Amino acid sequence: MNQEIQVEQRLSLYDIVREKREEKQVPISRMVYATYFSESAIQKIDVEQVLTKQIKELSDTQGQISGFLLIRGLFSLHLVETQSHVMNLWMRNLYAEYRKEKNIYSMINIVTVNEDNPTRCFDRWYCENLFQTGPQLSDMDKTEAQCQERVWELYQQVCNAGIKHSARTQKDKQQNKIANDVPISLDDINMLLHKRFMSIEEYNELYLGDIKIELEQEKVYPQTLPLTRALEYKDLGE
């Protein structure tokens, strides 16, 4: 009786490396922005519930959104990571919400933006609300260099906290807060909400608004004379 013997082909190291290289890796965009809520608005709605619903709806229909939203009273720090087109949709929705006559935001500052990240720091989207009052904003006395250094530290802390938390078991996740690994002082909050950072209006105009193309001067008719030539010919008719 003939029995068919199936031999499973073993992959060589070369085959494994080739397969990994051929795998399609979609680059991830990552953004951090800081917000200051309208005190009158958040007294009427559950901010955490509203934002969780918005994230879920976009994530379910367009593509996974991961990251971390930290709410501390009127202040929030939000790290969002997703594919580039989904990020644009989220930011358009955020800007549209900000432009409403009655909205939950009084200020939105873009802290960092970077694209083409090979991996995510967070395995899903998390939100932690510390239920604090305030904070009351005040002036900032940091230099440009000090701001850049501190922003980089905060960015690294949030990313590392995400990697650490994502590796935990479900039980450990329930017992440990991400916020414990992201210490943010009142001085940090005043810095993140300072006018030195790009506002949501500036971001929209620069990245999301319609592109305005102006023809070069030599392609425009009639051409505008340079000031020196205009002065040269201004007396010809006198």
Image: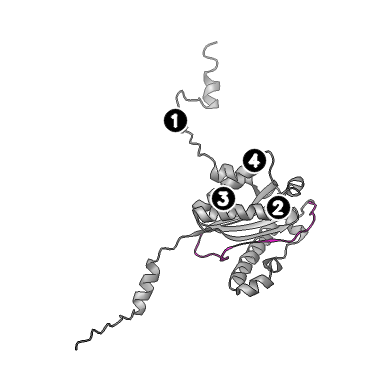
Of callouts 3 and 2, the N-terminal one: 2
The residue located at (56%, 53%) in the rendering is 57
In what quadrant of the picture does the C terminus appear? top right
Q: Cα distance, mark 1 to mark 2? A: 56 Å
Measured along the vertical axis of the image, is residue 112 above or below residue 221?
below
Asked if marks 4 and 3 touch (Cβ < 8 Å), the reply is no
90 to the left or right of 191: left
Residue closest to the eye, 3 or 111: 3
Given residues 77 and 61, the one toward you in this image is: 61
State the CA–CA distance, disc 4 to disc 2.
19 Å
- Considering only order in the chain, which callout, 2 or 4, is on the residue closer to the N terminus? 2
Q: Residue furthest top?
A: 238
Question: Mark 3 is on which residue type?
Answer: Trp
Of pointers 1 and 2, the one earlier in the residue sequence: 2
- Where residue 68 sits, quadrant-wise, is bottom right
Q: Mark 3 and mark 2: span between their CA atoms?
A: 20 Å
Amino acid at pointer 2: Asp
Q: Which residue is mark 3?
A: 90
Label located before the other in sequence (4 or 3):
3
Q: Which residues are magenta?
A: 116-137
Look at mark 4 in the image and give the residue it sits on.
Answer: 99
Is residue 130 one of those drawn in magenta? yes
Question: What type is the residue that disc 4 sits on?
Answer: Arg
Give the alpha-carbon distance from disc 3 to disc 1, as whole Å: 40 Å
**Among all residues in the image, which is located at the extreme bottom?**
1
Residue located beneath label 1 in the image: 218
Labels 1, 2: front one: 2
